[in-house]
Amino acid sequence: MTTRFCARGSPRSWKTRATRSSVARGDADDLLLKVRSYKPSVAIVDVRMPPGNADDGLVAAAEIRRSYPDVAVLVLSQHVEPAYLLELVGDDASGVGYLLKDRVRDVREFVDAVERVAAGGTAFDPDVVKMLVGGHRRSELDDLTDRERDVLTLIAEGRSNRAIGKELFLSGRAVERHVQAIFQKLRLPESEDANRRVLAVLALLGK
């Protein structure tokens, strides 16, 4: 099924082979109007938008999360701001992405992030995740081995087990063992694997 998304902020246009876009320039209020009118699968939002050009885009993204829970949100930021990510996630990491604008230069990586978020997954920028891992310690996370922490970090970025294995030079079976160990150490309840991955991300974020 073709993914529809509503893009705001920069870059000025979004066109991919897998995605049909609805593009228009405007402020945060206009973004909310377009989301309400078009019901896109994904809203791609620049943190800094008119009228204030401060965190207006983030405020709009949070409102979309509250008022239109079926619309995934991918936020683009110029700088690493973990607080923005934590505010956006709230108590549910499903269908949320937060990327630095530099990542958008890699079209394939960007399209993958859009599709992961649209499917209810996560796409968190590696630099933001590293900062959170380095400064956010909880007892459950302290029980993880260094390798399990690496795997959890890549889960937070939205990577599949196959992609994690490729990044860390691990077999699919080894990745699955690490993933299951993470679930067990974080005391995540039995549920669908996708839901447990989101819960693991929340644990990483200190939620």
Image (cartoon, helix red, strand yellow):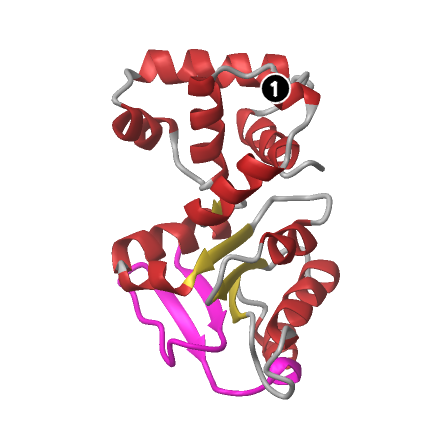
Q: Is residue 72 above or below residue 190?
A: below
Question: x and y percent of residue 97 in the render?
Answer: 51, 53
Image location of residue 20, percent across then percent down: 38, 68
Q: Amino acid at mark 1?
A: Asp
Asked whether residue 186 appears in the rendered view, the answer is yes
Q: Quadrant of residue 18?
A: bottom left
Q: Position of residue 67 (x, y in %)?
A: 74, 63
- The mark tally for this picture is 1
Q: Position of residue 198 (x, y in %)?
A: 59, 35
Give the residues drawn in magenta, as a range: 1-30
Point 42% across, 77% down: residue:
10
- In magenta segment, residue 75: no
Q: Residues within 10 Å of mark 1 (few under 14, many from 20)?
A: few
Left or right for 113, reference 168: right
Residue 40 position (above or below residue 89): below
Viewer-nearest residue: 48 or 199: 48
Q: Is residue 119 above or below residue 45?
A: above
Residue in the image at 35% along x and 58% along y: 103
Q: In the picture, which quadrant includes the C terminus?
A: top right
Residue 188 visible within the image: no
Question: Is-magenta flag for residue 17?
Answer: yes
Q: Quadrant of residue 19?
A: bottom left
For mark 1, give the secondary structure: helix
Q: Disc 1 designates what residue?
A: 142
Vertical relation: 76 (above or below) 122: below
Q: Nearer the viewer, residue 4 or 73?
A: 73
Residue at image position (49%, 76%) is: 8
Residue 193 vs residue 114: left or right?
right
Residue at horizontal 53%, vertical 69%? 45
